[in-house]
């Protein structure tokens, strides 16, 4: 049995937290921009921190497992 939780969660978070795809924090004109497909260095850094924190939450704190 392989544990697929880590790659599935990592890929999903990476896709959803790409700056500008669904939301962008901080936005250029507003604090949060939605579906604008633009990015900035500050946004990339903030999304990187959020990605790391959520990945730690799911894999270390919640200890999520998906066996297939």
Image (spheres, rainbow, N blue to C red):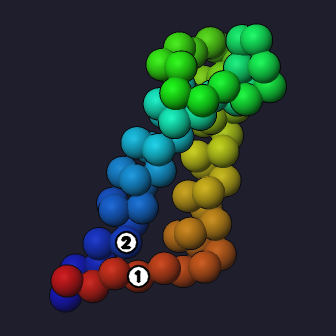
Q: Earlier in the sequence, mark 1 or mark 2?
A: 2
From the viewer's side, name the closer residue of 39 and 60.
39
Q: Is residue 47 rendered to the left or right of residue 1?
A: right
Mark 2 and mark 1 in contact (Cβ < 8 Å)? yes
The image quadrant where one finds the N terminus is: bottom left
Measuring from the top left, give residue 46's x and y in whole percent: 69, 31
Q: Secondary structure at mark 1?
A: loop
Mark number for residue 42?
none
Q: Is residue 31 rendered to the left or right of residue 4?
A: right
Q: Is residue 60 rendered to the left or right of residue 32?
A: left
Q: Residue at x 39, y 65 (%)?
A: 6
Crowd rating for badge 1 (residues with CA inside 10 Å; few <14, some 14–19, many 20+): some
Mark number for residue 5?
2
Q: CA distance from mark 1 to mark 2?
A: 5 Å
State the residue lying farthest toward the right: 31
Q: Residue at x 48, y 19 (%)?
A: 37
From the viewer's side, name the closer residue of 61 and 31.
31
Measuring from the top left, give residue 8's x and y in whole percent: 34, 62
Residue 37 lies, with reference to residue 2, above or below; the image says above
Crowd rating for badge 2 (residues with CA inside 10 Å; few <14, some 14–19, many 20+): some
Visible in this render: residue 45? Answer: no
Q: Which residue is mark 1?
A: 65
From the viewer's side, name the closer residue of 15 and 29.
29
From the viewer's side, name the closer residue of 43 and 6.
43
Residue 8 lies, with reference to residue 40, above or below; the image says below
Q: Secondary structure at mark 2?
A: helix
Measuring from the top left, give residue 53's x and y in whole percent: 66, 53
The image quadrant where one finds the C terminus is: bottom left
């Amino acid at each position: 049995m392989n544990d697929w939780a880590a790659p599935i969660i990592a890929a999903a978070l990476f896709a959803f937290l790409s700056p500008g795809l669904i939301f962008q924090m901080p936005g250029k004109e507003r604090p949060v921009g939605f579906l604008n497909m633009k990015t900035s260095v500050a946004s990339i850094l903030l999304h990187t921190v959020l990605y790391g924190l959520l990945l730690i939450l799911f894999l270390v704190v919640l200890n999520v497992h998906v066996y297939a």
